[in-house]
Amino acid sequence: MKTNHTYSFISLTVILLFCFVLNISLGSVSIPLGAIIESLFGTAENTTWQVIITDFRLPKAITAILVGSGLGISGLLMQTLFRNPLAGPFVLGISSGASLGVALVILGSGLFGGLFATTLISKWSIVIAASLGSFLVLLAVLAVSSKVRDTMAILIIGLMFGSITAAVVSVLSYFSSAEQLQQYIFWGFGSLSNLSWEELLIFFGIYGIGILLSIASIKGLNSLLLGDNYAKSLGLNLKQSRYIIIIATSLIAGTITAFAGPIAFIGLAIPHLTRQIFKTSNHKILLPAVFLFGAIVMLICDSIAQVPSSDYVLPINAITALVGAPVVIWLLVRQRKMMF
Amino acid sequence: MNMTAERQHIILKADQLSIGYKTKKKETVVASDINFELQKGHLIGLVGANGIGKSTLLRTLIKVQPALSGNISLNGKNIQTTTNLELAKHLSIVLTEPLTSKNLTVFELVALGRHPYTNWIGNLTEADDSIISNSLELVNITELKDKRCYELSDGQLQKVMIARALAQDTAIIVLDEPTTHLDMYHKAYILKLLQTLTKETGKTILFSSHEIDLAIQLCDTMIVMQKDKMVFDQPCKLISEGVFNSLFPKDLIVFDEKIGSFRVNK
């Protein structure tokens, strides 16, 4: 059993590297492969190419890897915790909280006037608003969930908070100007580009903590496959594990939403894709596999969104679903059975 | 009977136990004044009519819900003050609730039983591997090892769950209605298997069941729950005391003491 997984992991890593180079080599300016590799090592003679690679394409490709792997892993955590194949990284209301934060900043400026209207809406204010929004919604979900003993109830509570924030966003958009609405909608498209190296560093730091917490939860996640009562009988501290899993998810999904916008679909689909291909529910195998798959799929989606050798950049949020959904449907139809 | 020698082998003890459900407003007592002492290596059947509180009692014994009052001690330790992890090394369970994921292989599922002993990420040592193989052998499912749980019949799955509990290497295994959904042959098979396991491994096994006649034939002791009282004794004594006669309303079935079984009133 172990050996054939080793091969899968090696080939996935190779595919990931290939997609990574492919992603960097594609863009509105065509740069020869030799120069790309030189640029990566900082030895390119053409400084324009050097800048394009190290300041634009490389950060974007790394962002794609962090976003894809992060969303996949938080989706996996939520699906196991909630014993629900429809759960994703955003079931706890994280993305709706972030949307609310961003909506308040962009759309609210009309309502609240002065305070926001004067300061131009910078990228950082959106990142901070998204983080604050998702964090506050998460705190609310955690506070309520500490009162309930049933894991399913947390799922419903997360969804309810999502509905509330969505409603507030609707009200805000009703009172907003067309220009503000457009800006809000653009944020909703998601974007992997325009992250500076400093931003990327912060992103990676928080993401890293979330990933470490997920790795620490692997054993608990496996015992949760039997159900809550069995997990407890195996010595799992249910409440504590639940908190760690929820915090890991919100750190990962929260920062991703803050920096790249609410990117749908990946978090729900990647765990299913991985289960279908690896044919296992063991998180010791699933977690690294989901990491690789998520990164690969995101790099591919981003390459497509670039519309190779053109100036167009399509919204990444649309591409992920356009590319991913048919793949998942095809896999489910072919296998005729959902793995969970 | 040598009482002092017996007393040293008590695995699970219930003392003045009262079980039920408590909300802020009121306390619903399902059963009270429950006392028993389960011996090492015994097979104990828990029987009683539907809704009498068998599941509540088992859930209380395995610490899924708290007792209203009284004490449960496992190997001399109060279970309320024991941590989940400590308890996991002394008590394993087989429940009626369905598994969340049936996508695990039989081996992987049984291996989960080693969780209380494995390291932070759950790596299996050679010792763990041999305990798992041994558990599979004890319930005769070694050949199912690489099958996935969704491929199994109900009877096979029940055996896998028992193997998982064995792999947990605990002094006592508690099973909630292990014979539901099984045909007559497999009901007898599972209960006979439990009896064999108590003999071979020296573990104490407590199960609840509606198969009263099978339990009478196989158990060392039985706990009979009735509306107003609870009796704990050997099956033959329970029969001679006429406990089973008063278990159900007499309009439909009666207990025949000669054959040790129920029959339908003609």
Image (tube, coloured by chain):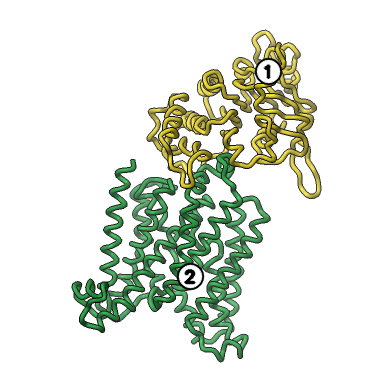
Chain colours: A green, B yellow
Q: Is residue A268 left or right of residue B223?
A: left
Residue name at image x 55 percent, y 60 percent = A247
* Residue A337 drawn at (x, y percent): 40, 46
Residue B193 percent location from the top left of the image: 52, 21
Q: Which residue is mark 2?
A: A257
Q: Which residue is located at x 33 percent, y 78 percent?
A: A56
Q: Position of residue A326 (x, y in %)?
A: 35, 60
Looking at the image, which residue is at 51% across and 67% down?
A254
Q: Residue at x 43, y 46 (%)?
A: A281
Q: What is the distance, in whole Å, between disc 2 and disc 1 at their CAs?
A: 64 Å
Q: Amino acid at mark 1?
A: Glu
What number is the disc on residue B210? none
Q: Amino acid at mark 2?
A: Thr
Q: Which residue is mark 1?
A: B6
Asked if residue A315 shows in the view, the reply is: yes
- Image coordinates for residue B230, horizontal then vertical, percent: 75, 25
Above/below status of A225 relative to A119: above
Q: Is residue A184 left or right of residue B23?
A: left
Give whichever of A42, A168 is nearer the camera.
A42
Q: Which quarter of the figure has residue A169? A: bottom right
Task: For the N terminus of chain A, give its image quadrant.
Answer: top left
Q: Secondary structure beneath disc 1?
A: helix
